Amino acid sequence: MPADDPNVLAFQDQPISQLLVKVAARCNIDCSYCYWFRDAAVYNKPKLMGADVLHRLLQRIEEHVIQHGLVDFPIILHGGEPLLWGVENFHLIAEACEAISFRTGCDIPIAVTTNGVLIDEEWLDCFESRHISVAISLDGPAHIHDINRRTFQGTGTHAAAEKAARMLVSRDIGVSALAVCNPAFSPEQYVAFFAKCGIANYDIMIPDATVDETPPSVAAFYNGLFDLWLAANRSEPTANIRIIGDMITALLGNNSPTEGVGHKPIELCTVMTDGSVEAHDVLRIAGDGSTHTKFNIFEHAIDEVRNEPRWQAARDASIRLCETCRQCKFMNACGGGYLPHRFSKANGYDNPSVYCDDLYAMFENMQSVLEGHLYISKPDGERLDVRSARAASAGGGG
Ligand code: SF4
């Protein structure tokens, strides 16, 4: 696709719209599938973000929202394990962002993604008083979670994570859970566990893999999950499962809010503990140096990373799909799958997702089920279900 592709040009002037801030470059547990340590360069970074970096970062955030007239600018605190940064630093950044919001009128919601192991009452007070929303990594019940999410001594972390999840739910804190799908187990086990914990918002994410790998199929798992979601929500909403909601949103022709579903640019960048600015950090799944840029917040404004070839390559790849995807009937809804899942050493991101067959089967199943639930209202009040309307249209009828 040419460099002046309108799909790419349409997004070239959009400023960075959210920030992933790595406040800790180390973790306190040792998950087997973590992408963060696939690039050994993280060990060259300071373990924690220092006061000088935080101070400069806050200046850059204020400069960025003023320069681009942003009305909101979400910040996600991330790691490693971000709670290693300490509760005082969370208070500091939240208070400073509140002050920036007050001065600029730009809403700066703060979220954190944590493994939950360090959460105690002091953390809960901080999250609640500072309106910090929390996504806790929790792979469903213990026998699934503890397969991959273990301490450096090899013991499971489920007991601590579940306890933290229940503590979060007990307070006035925006809580969601992030699980990674293990298709060897049934979706019922995840759904029942989250219901038991009182967690109404969660995601069960497709495991990270590149095209150079051969991950197990996930279609049967997600088709089962969709059936469960549909049955549970038939009368009134009970649980919001992010990937299901996003896929339905995308199938109905709307923008899904998260980056893993749909055809849209990845406009996010990552600030590291030393103030260096990188492309989206999940792209380090592609190996050493894959997200590194020459930019840092001491010398550069946040938006300058958009001039960096590696950042541009990732952003352009998110909207410039391979030929197979461009011919696919689910191109707009699927968007080629999650960008890291399209990477291969031979072609870069110029591939369908390593999960292409699964994604196609999932969208096909979801579309056929949804069609049975959707109808078109005619001006005379008659209601036609979508399948009948399509058949009538194909037959030359109204
Ligand atoms: S289903 Fe496959 S071919 Fe279709 S858009 Fe998704 S990854 Fe591309």
Image (cartoon, helix red, strand yellow):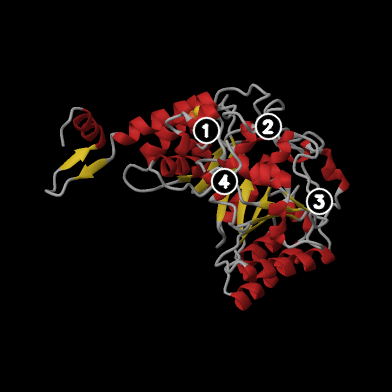
- Badges 3 and 1: C-beta atoms under 8 Å apart? no
Q: Look at discs 1 and 4 and give the one toward the viewer.
A: 4
Q: What residue does disc 4 label?
A: 8
Q: Secondary structure at mark 3?
A: loop
Task: Look at the picture and state if 267 lies above or below 338.
Answer: below
Residue type at tag 3: Lys
Kind of element beneath mark 1: helix
Q: CA distance from mark 3 to mark 4?
A: 23 Å
Q: What numbered label is drawn on residue 348?
A: 2
Q: Is residue 56 visible?
A: yes
- Residue occupying the point 52% across, 40% down: 261
Report how far apart the C-alphas of labels 2 and 1 lie in the structure. Answer: 36 Å
Position of residue 362 measured from the top left corner of the image (x, y, whole percent): 45, 29
Q: Around disc 2, counting alpha carbons within 10 Å, would you say few (fewer than 14), some (14 to 19), or many (20 or more)?
A: some
Q: Which residue is mark 1?
A: 189
The correct choice, above or below, for 115 with respect to 371 in the image is below
Q: Say the numbered circle drawn on residue 294.
A: 3
| Quarter in which the C terminus is drawn | top left
